[in-house]
Amino acid sequence: MARPMLLMGQPLLAPLLPLLRADHDVIALWEAPSVGELMAVDALVWAGEFPLGPDLLDLLPRLSLIACFTVGYDGVDLALARDRGIAVTHAGNANAEDVADHAIGLMIAHRRGIVTGDRDIRSGRWTIQSKTRTRSMAGARLGIVGMGAIGLAVAERAQVMKMAVGWWGPREKPGLPWPRTWSLETLAQQSDILLVACRADDTNRGLIAGNVMDALGTDGLLVNVARGQFVNEIALIDALRSGRLGGAALDVFDPEPADPMRWRDVPNVVLTPHTGGATHEAVGRMAQMLMANLSAHFAGRPLPCPVA
């Protein structure tokens, strides 16, 4: 029986090659495979945040599975895949707990001045007279945009820290112990910290616009661990420079990698390079889920983690 043929989509997935080649024949898109090789591809292993449209799919007539290594799959045209009878899988909630930890870390780093404190010591600006006062976490009002796996994990951590939690999302979720606010702008008005943790799709680009930032206000903190496309970065930088928004802590940007010149002199920000879910443990879980999805697909079993 012939081994399934896999196509690897991005060089960042190259460390998976030894694992995948134990049970599959594998070719890499970045190595310019021949037309004949592409016509033999049964499954595509893809980093889900990268755009995937008809141009590549047209070259893969045998394709029956798009297996996203990542949790996110917003780069995949699901309607197109559905029309062509191609299944789509992802890594489920493999890194939700780690992203939630990172979100809490960003909040603490900004609200307690950890990054600026480190800079003050290194630059010699710390003196007895210049001691900085920061803000408590307990009692802070946290508004969560999107109450999926990451939002839930952050809410649970925030509750332990004695923060007041509210949320907003497009759909009700009965049974949650935290109140759902009727609008995003109202949630921002009622929050000291606004966390963006929703799932990306075509409807929510620029969701966090100037009106939301103004509602969050001069003492408010915007935290984004979801996708950079949710936040209007030009409006955000203007709000930070003008003081209309108190601060931002960001792990995601639009586009990525972020332009360092865009952020060089922006005040009151803490920035990390999209590392929220990139722990050794989470990557291991994503690899396990990828293998489980591939094995089930080629054995004709139900997929462990289908997108839809």
Image (cartoon, rainbow, N blue to C red):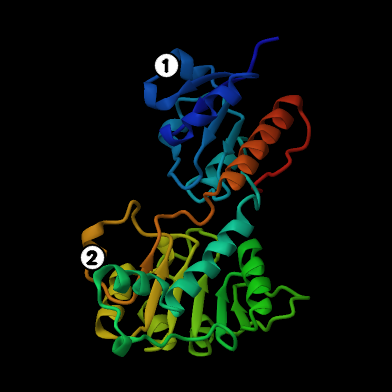
The number of discs equals: 2
Q: Is residue 42 visible?
A: no
- Name the side, left or right, on which 278 lies relative to 33: right
- Name the side, left or right, on which 177 lies relative to 261: right
| Rendered image quadrant of residue 271 | bottom left
Q: Residue at x 55, y 86 (%)?
A: 140
Report the Cα–Cα distance between label 1 and label 2.
Answer: 45 Å
Q: Where in the figure is residue 12, as x and y percent of width and height?
A: 44, 36
Q: Where in the figure is residue 70, as x and y percent of width and height?
A: 55, 45
- Name the side, left or right, on which 116 lies relative to 3: left
Which part of the image, by quadrant, shows the N terminus? Answer: top right
Badge 2 marks a residue whose secondary structure is: loop
Going by the numbered disc 1, the residue's amino acid type is: Val
| Rendered image quadrant of residue 258 | bottom left
- Name the side, left or right, on which 250 lies relative to 282: left
Question: Relative to residue 73, is residue 262 depicted above or below?
Answer: below
Q: Is residue 257 visible?
A: yes
Q: Residue at x 42, y 16 (%)?
A: 35
Q: Where in the figure is residue 84, as x and y percent of width and height?
A: 58, 35
Q: Where in the figure is residue 262, as x and y percent of width and height?
A: 23, 63
- Give the mark, 1 or 2, whose residue is nearer the N terminus: 1
Q: Nearer the viewer, residue 192 or 59?
A: 192
Dot 2 corresponds to which residue?
Answer: 264
Going by the numbered disc 2, the residue's amino acid type is: Arg
Q: Residue at x 76, y 28 (%)?
A: 300
Look at discs 1 and 2 and give the one toward the viewer. Answer: 2
Q: Nearer the viewer, residue 226 or 116?
A: 116
Q: Residue at x 46, y 29 (%)?
A: 58
Dot 1 corresponds to which residue?
Answer: 35
